[in-house]
Amino acid sequence: GAKGKLMATRFARENSIPFLGVYLGFQIATIEIARNLLGMADANSTELDPECPSPVIDILPEQKSVKDMGASMRLGSQKVIVQEGSVAAQLYGATEIMERHRHRYEVNPEYIPALEGAGWKFTGRSEDGIKMEIGEMDGHPFFVASQFHPEFKSRPRKPSPLHLGLVRAAIAYKKEKVERHERL
């Protein structure tokens, strides 16, 4: 469940282990950072706890009045504006990308300044700048998460830049661990 995901995410963040969160993983990373770096023990998603006192993840405003949930998500290819110099911009080789979405929840805008102040930088945003699309942890070798689904466009001969970045970061992590062990 969510508790195990939060624990694994925290372990990766605190131990500089490469991490890629996709969709729910992006939301879990945001909750974990709010809880453990901002001290908001009650931070959660309204999807997981509709009555949570600190909803760092909340339903999209345009979804709040929707009663029939069938096909009412934010769906399809959407433009994402990527911050120049970010890990994501380096991986994609671009500051404007198109990625596919399938979700109803987002980072609650009320918490963005505090989350970024804790080092959780939102380096990808919707074209209008309102929806957070990519998060990166400051000072971590590879702690990246996306609200969108990069796997939807990934192909065997052209993998998603985020997934390729994770694999490369994992190889570098393993190599560094082996070299450090050999020096001991």
Image: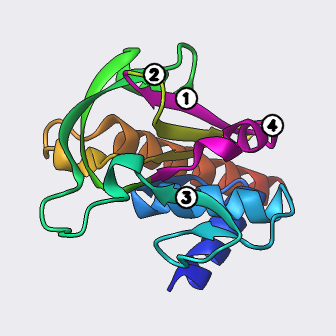
The verdict on residue 76 being magenta is: no
Q: Residue at x 80, y 72 (%)?
A: 41
Taking 138 as reference, is 65 above or below it? Answer: below
Whole-Å distance between the Cαs marked 4 and 2? Answer: 19 Å
Q: For this rendering, which residue is in front, 138 or 113?
A: 113
* N-terminal label among 1 and 2: 2
The residue at which mark 1 appears reads as 123
* N-terminal label among 1 and 3: 3
Whole-Å distance between the Cαs marked 1 and 4? Answer: 13 Å
Instruction: Determine contact: label 1, label 2, CB under 8 Å.
Output: yes
Tell me the mark number nearer the camera, choosing from 3 and 2: 3
The residue at which mark 2 appears reads as 82
* N-terminal label among 3 and 2: 3
Taking 15 as reference, is 135 above or below it? Answer: above
Q: Amino acid at mark 3?
A: Ile
The magenta stretch is 106-127
